[in-house]
Amino acid sequence: MSSFVVLGAQWGDEGKGKMTDYLAETAEMVVRFQGGNNAGHTVEVGDKQYKLHLIPSGILYDNKVNIIGNGVVLDPEALFNEIEYLEGLGVKVTPEKLLISDRAQLIMPYHKVLDGLKEKKRGKNDIGTTGKGIGPCYTDKMERSGIRVCDLLEEDTFKEKLQDALEIKNPFITDVLGGEAFDFDEICEKYLNFAKKIRPFVTDTSVKVYDSIKASKKVLFEGAQGTLLDIDYGTYPFVTSSNTIAGGVCTGGGIGPTMVNSAIGIAKAYTTRVGKGPFPTELEDEMGAWLRDKGQEFGVTTGRARRCGWLDLVILKSSARVSGLTSFAVTKIDTLAGLDKIKVCVGYDLNGEVIDYFPASLKKLAQCKPIYEEFDGWDESIKDATTYEELPSNAKKYLKKIEEFTGVKVAIVSVGPKRNQTIRISDI
Ligand code: GDP
Ligand code: IMO
Ligand code: MG
């Protein structure tokens, strides 16, 4: 048995797309198990750049099976746009290469509108969502009024569920949130057209994933977002609406915990966050702007500038714990090249007490002052390194610190966005 998870260890955008693409080379199946097209995963292969939102990054290979699992919230419009985008770049997306769970929840047009209207209603306390309808769709799933892919394939079931949904959504949208009502016939026509197109891709993906693992095929679970955006362990309510941590693989991929062998946390060599919410090591000064410029820190899905700050080892330690990480892949270490000194957060001062865990209370978190350790920097040569030995000695010290603090080895270091700009230090 050989299956492993690739997870974001911070607030997303750590380079999961790049690492999934790199690690998928030896895998036969790549599975998305949570989130939706709020994700933006960038993969560079040769001189081409691909931006994936909903479809697993393994799609860029001709010979991998890619799965959109039951835990994903699927916007059919976004799906077919992404398929068109990929085919325009010469990537084939066939039912042999892409399988969609019949249990995945559908993002409906009213979810997207509700996302925007609720954000507006929150005013200055908005979350800064991607506006893709993620929260409202997961809300309906848990409230048990969601519409699933299998429902879309049964015209009468779909119509019945849509009718029921609109009876509640429309008055809420118009009377409470001041929006416009949705027309049943319009949605029906649009979605029943999607039904025809989606049918060949739909199956019970849990069976496919299980069979692959049982047949000793390598299965890679590609996480979206990151630990601190997890609905339970993130900076609630400034989080996304799914379990982004390793536990999400079981519920969202349809397999048991005994079938997952390892979990790799993808950690950027510094910290970024897009959207609102607490961020203890944020740099709202020239240093933060320098990181944003050098690292090209702009959101793939919304184009928003990412907030930037120093590496926070308290976060990585929490990620290691809640996901049982077996290794880290540290990305974008090349971005830090050229700095004389680099700071790393090794604990928080919470009203005089030193803590090394991430508090649940946002009030307490706001009182946490990062405690920094300073490291000597390294030069630009790091982006050409191909082995661990070639890394500058100060970069090695930086990586050692991550290992010491978290108790988890750094197995991979990424020194650039391309597949071959990846250094394998040890087995994952
Ligand atoms: P994801 O959401 O975790 O897949 O990450 P994003 O694609 O949103 O953001 C990561 C960005 O960093 C993308 O533009 C990648 O091409 C880029 N990237 C990934 N790894 C590296 C690296 O090691 N060095 C540099 N310079 N860029 C990287
Ligand atoms: P990848 O997979 C970074 C953030 C949004 C917002 C919060 C809630 O590319 O790492 P949502 O639309 O999910 O309800 O928004 O979560 N967010 C992400 N931030 N990377 C992502 O995905 C994200 N997906 C959602 O900015 O703060
Ligand atoms: Mg991203």
Image (cartoon, rainbow, N blue to C red):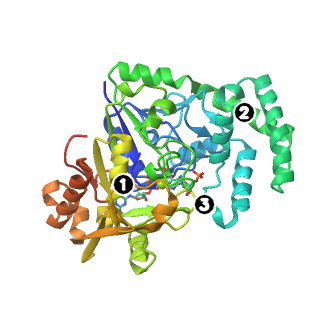
**From this viewpoint, is residue 139 visible?**
yes
Query: As displayed, is residue 7 above or below residue 104?
Result: below
Mark identifier at residue 20: none
Where is residue 360 drawn, in percent x and y? 47, 53
Mark identifier at residue 145: 2
* Label 1 vs label 3, nearer the camera: 1
Q: Quadrant of residue 21?
A: top left
Give whichever of discs 1 and 2 has the lower sequence position: 2
For the residues labelled 1 and 2, the Cα–Cα distance comes to 37 Å
Residue type at tag 2: Ser
Query: As displayed, is residue 184 above or below residue 177?
Result: above
Distance from mark 3 CB to nearest ligand 2 atom below 8 Å: yes
Residue type at tag 1: Tyr
| Local secondary structure at mark 2 | loop
Mark identifier at residue 357: 1
Outermost residue, bottom direction?
286
Residue type at tag 3: Gly
